[in-house]
Image: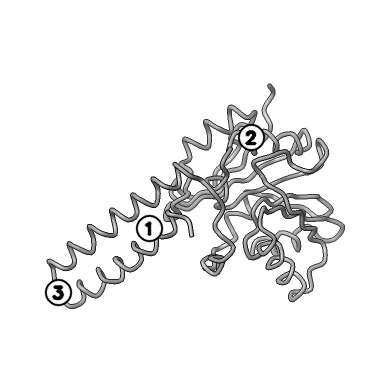
Amino acid sequence: MRRQDLAQVVEGVAATGLVVALVKRRWRYAVAFLSIAVEADLAARYWSRKAPSPLPAGLRFLLRVPRPLTAFHNALLAMPRERVLEVGPGLGQNAVAVARWLQPGGRLDVLDVQQPMLDATMARARAEGVENIVPTLADASGTLPYEDATFDAAYMLHVLGEVADRDQVLRELRRVLKPDGRLVVGELLIDPDFVRLAELERVAGEAGFRMEARHGPAFYYHARLVKDAL
């Protein structure tokens, strides 16, 4: 378990205690639990910045929280017959949906550094009858195992903050995207690995992307980036 995950567990326990204290009108306890929750949240974000790393596969049950796909769909603009790359598919919820958007004739590649995440994604795809997903085991912080200008689009949902070298992965994503390719980055504030929109614009700009559109508020956004002239 990462230190940021441990801090989030403490935050969750404190938040539960806060709710109970408020219901019972135990104001002193409520203040104490609120203080613990805030401190734990700050600690989680500190350790995420200091030592970014993927969510351990053993904690993948945390990814079962459903999230709406409308904003993501509007940002990605996936079309049939396209080839798309997902970095960090988690349990495959988004992968299965995207793979269907790409039908007929399209293909979704999913890349993860942990085999159990790929196994979970492919198991979900088989269970839902989706056959156009191709898994690859690799580290996104290194050289992506794809040729230049391979993909029409790529996306990372709640993943960029977990990558040790953000500059490297963004440069590599730019390399493997076609000249008119697009990259979608999705982030949610409650995630300790949250990447602020201003920070995304900075690192993406340095990697050769420019912001084309943003869907959703700054605390829960899906940003569409396109390749800029270098």
- Between disc 3 and disc 2, the foreground one is 2
Q: Are marks 1 and 3 in contact (CB under 8 Å)?
A: no
Residue behind mark 1: 7
Label 1 Cα neighbours within 10 Å, binned few <14 / some 14-19 / many ≥20: many
Q: How many marks?
A: 3
The answer to whether 200 is drawn above or below residue 81 in the figure is above
Q: Nearer the viewer, residue 18 or 154?
A: 18
Please give the name of the residue rendered at 57% of the width and 55% of the height, measured from the top-left corner.
71
Residue behind mark 3: 25
Residue behind mark 2: 168
Q: Is residue 64 left or right of residue 130?
A: left
Q: How far across and how far down the image is residue 183, in percent?
A: 66, 42
Label 3 Cα neighbours within 10 Å, binned few <14 / some 14-19 / many ≥20: few
User: Residue extending furthest right?
Assistant: 105
Q: Nearer the viewer, residue 112 or 202?
A: 112
Q: Secondary structure at mark 2?
A: helix
Rounded to the nearest angstrom, the CA distance separating label 1 from label 3 is 26 Å
Q: Is residue 1 left or right of residue 113?
A: left
Q: Is residue 88 left or right of residue 78?
A: left
Q: Secondary structure at mark 3?
A: loop
Rounded to the nearest angstrom, the CA distance separating label 1 from label 2 is 28 Å
The answer to whether 184 is drawn above or below residue 205 in the figure is below
